[in-house]
């Protein structure tokens, strides 16, 4: 079952700020997450938390929570020091 996606306000603002190529990677990653939110290519974000998951693709990282009907994206980031984004 493909779930609906909700974004926090912070993620929406960052998504709108992203360069076009990164936004496309981000949306592709979100589509992959909604198709299989607990798939093998995602991981638990914290040891003491069984709800928050993390997935990444080509320097774009997303933290999200899976509920019965929604995937709630709570954080997004880009790791690319050469372009002035966070260093890995």
Image (cartoon, rainbow, N blue to C red):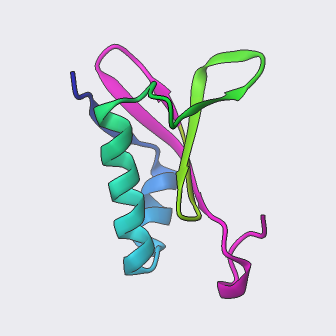
Q: In this view, does 20 lie above or below 14?
A: below
The quarter holding residue 72 reads top left
On the picture, is 37 further left or further right than 88? Answer: left
Q: In this view, does 8 lie above or below 27?
A: above
On the picture, is 4 further left or further right than 52? Answer: left
Q: Give the residue at x 44% y 80%.
A: 19
Q: In this view, does 84 lie above or below 29?
A: below
Which quarter shows the C terminus?
bottom right
Q: Position of residue 44 (x, y in %)?
A: 64, 27
The quarter holding residue 34 reads top left
Q: Give the residue at x 73% y 79%.
A: 81
Q: Where is residue 63 in the image (x, y as percent from the top left)?
A: 57, 41
- Asked whether 45 or 8 is in front, the reply is 45
The quarter holding residue 52 reads top right
Q: Position of residue 40 (x, y in %)?
A: 50, 30
Q: Give the residue at x 44% y 23%.
A: 66
Give the magenta part as a residue range.
64-88
- Asked whether 7 or 44 is in front, the reply is 44
Number of marks drawn? 0
- Asked whether 77 or 9 is in front, the reply is 77
Q: Give the residue at x 33% y 26%.
A: 70
Q: Does the magenta stretch include residue 46?
A: no
Which quarter shows the N terminus?
top left
């Amino acid at each position: 079952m493909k779930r609906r996606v909700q974004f926090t306000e912070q993620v929406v603002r960052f998504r709108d700020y992203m360069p076009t190529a990164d936004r496309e990677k981000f949306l592709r990653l979100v589509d992959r997450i909604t198709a299989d939110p607990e798939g093998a290519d995602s991981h638990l974000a914290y040891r003491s938390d069984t709800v928050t998951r993390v997935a990444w693709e080509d320097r774009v990282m997303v933290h999200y929570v899976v509920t019965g009907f929604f995937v709630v994206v709570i954080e997004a980031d880009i790791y690319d020091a050469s372009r002035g984004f966070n260093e890995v």
